[in-house]
């Protein structure tokens, strides 16, 4: 049985005093988690001993130009389950976050997508390779400062791509 | 206008017919080139290459109601048996390598129809970071087909256009040669 939104917010406040918690809409909890608490917070949300929110609805990221932000939507497959929107700030240069695939196996491909489009590295991810873009693609296209090649010519196996992406695919 | 334009002779809509001369009952004569063209244009087996929503229209065209088979167009699941590649959808950077490889695996002669806005120019995704602005940047295209997506009638029209093109293949050169002599 999953807790109601209000009691869930109280639990999160007690357990993670650094987190910013709000319940702007009924049935929803908005949380901003510190990167240091991210792994423990994910365990707390997902595990049966914690909240039992076993369904990761979405995992994506936003570029705020001064920082990157991971966004997670977490709920459970019950009508009464609250929806948790968790946001984690990451530094924009060399962004790294712990992988949550061990808590929600469904995070595997979304994390690869965020790696591909935003360049966030996930520590502990079982298979961190590109998923949408070719291996030799240069840059991270959903970052605000991404500049496309003016010609937009097909790369066709040419070009070096970013070092980080190549290392991941090696 | 009363003046018959010779150049439109082979653009007639019965391009699927084999030009023959009848000498005796039960005997017809034709030229080998015409026979080959006739065979090619009436058995355009196409590669199943649906990569976006245009593929839905391609499937509808192949299904019973529009019945692509009546033009001799039968889908093939392997490029080695296909004469025609109908690129039905958006081609992105990752698909570009695969598309070229599939095209190279097709036996010659081979033709390409760029179906829809995306395959022709990139369409609504023109200039996006991961989209090829038209499949003609990768392989030669014989027929461009407008629409987003085109209806099955439009695809059939494109196929008929391609058949006409095959019917007049090499004929311009023949004409020129005859005039010089």
Image (spheres, coloured by chain):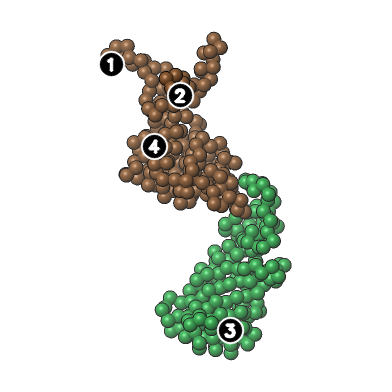
What residue is drawn where x is 41% and y is 26%?
Answer: B12
Q: Colour of chain A?
A: green
Q: Are marks 3 and 2 in contact (CB under 8 Å)?
A: no
In terms of image quadrants, where is residue A103?
A: bottom right
Q: Are marks 4 and 1 in contact (CB under 8 Å)?
A: no
User: What subunit carries mark 1?
Assistant: B
In terms of image quadrants, where is residue B26?
A: top left
Place of residue B144 in the rendered image (x, y in percent of width and height, measured from the top left): 50, 39
Q: Residue A104, relative to residue B76: is it above or below?
A: below
Sequence-wise first label, 1 or 2? 2
Sequence-wise first label, 4 or 2? 2
- Residue wearing tag 2: B8
- Distance from label 4 to label 2 (Cα)? 25 Å
Q: Nearer the viewer, mark 1 or mark 3?
A: 3
Q: In screen coordinates, is A147 left or right of B162?
A: right
Give the chain ID for the brown colour. B
Q: Residue A144, relative to residue B148: is it above or below?
A: below
What residue is drawn where x is 62% and y is 68%?
Answer: A62
Place of residue B175 in the rendered image (x, y in percent of width and height, measured from the top left): 51, 17
Q: Are marks 3 and 4 in contact (CB under 8 Å)?
A: no
- Residues marked 1 and 3, same chain: no
- Residue wearing tag 4: B73
């Amino acid at each position: 049985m999953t807790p109601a939104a209000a009691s869930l917010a109280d639990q999160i406040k007690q357990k993670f005093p650094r987190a910013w918690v709000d319940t702007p809409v009924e049935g929803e909890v908005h949380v901003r988690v510190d990167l240091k608490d991210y792994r423990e917070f994910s365990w707390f949300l997902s595990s049966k001993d914690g909240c039992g929110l076993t369904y990761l609805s979405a995992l994506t990221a936003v570029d705020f130009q001064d920082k990157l932000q991971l966004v997670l939507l977490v709920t459970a497959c019950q009508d009464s389950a609250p929806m948790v929107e968790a946001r984690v700030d990451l530094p924009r240069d060399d962004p790294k976050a712990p992988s949550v695939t061990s808590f929600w196996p469904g995070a595997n491909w979304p994390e690869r997508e965020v790696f591909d489009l935003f360049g966030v590295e996930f520590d502990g991810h079982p298979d961190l390779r590109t998923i949408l873009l070719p291996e030799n693609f240069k840059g991270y296209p959903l970052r605000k400062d991404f500049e496309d090649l003016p010609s937009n010519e097909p790369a066709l196996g040419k070009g070096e791509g970013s070092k980080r992406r190549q290392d991941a695919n090696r | 206008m009363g003046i018959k334009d010779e150049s439109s002779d082979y653009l007639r809509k019965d391009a699927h017919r084999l030009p023959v001369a009848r000498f005796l009952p039960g005997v017809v004569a034709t030229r080998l080139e015409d026979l080959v063209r006739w065979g090619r244009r009436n058995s355009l087996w196409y590669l199943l290459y649906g990569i976006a929503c245009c593929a839905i229209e391609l499937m509808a065209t192949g299904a019973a109601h529009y019945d692509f088979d009546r033009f001799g167009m039968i889908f093939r699941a392997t490029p080695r048996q296909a004469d025609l590649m109908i690129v039905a959808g958006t081609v992105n950077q990752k698909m570009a390598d695969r598309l070229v490889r599939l095209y190279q695996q097709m036996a010659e002669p081979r033709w390409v129809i760029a179906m829809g806005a995306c395959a022709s120019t990139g369409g609504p995704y023109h200039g996006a970071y991961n989209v090829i602005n038209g499949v003609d940047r990768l392989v030669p295209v014989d027929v461009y087909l407008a629409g987003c997506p085109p209806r099955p009638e439009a695809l059939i029209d494109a196929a008929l256009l391609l058949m006409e093109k095959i019917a007049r293949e090499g004929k311009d050169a023949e004409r020129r040669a005859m005039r010089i002599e």
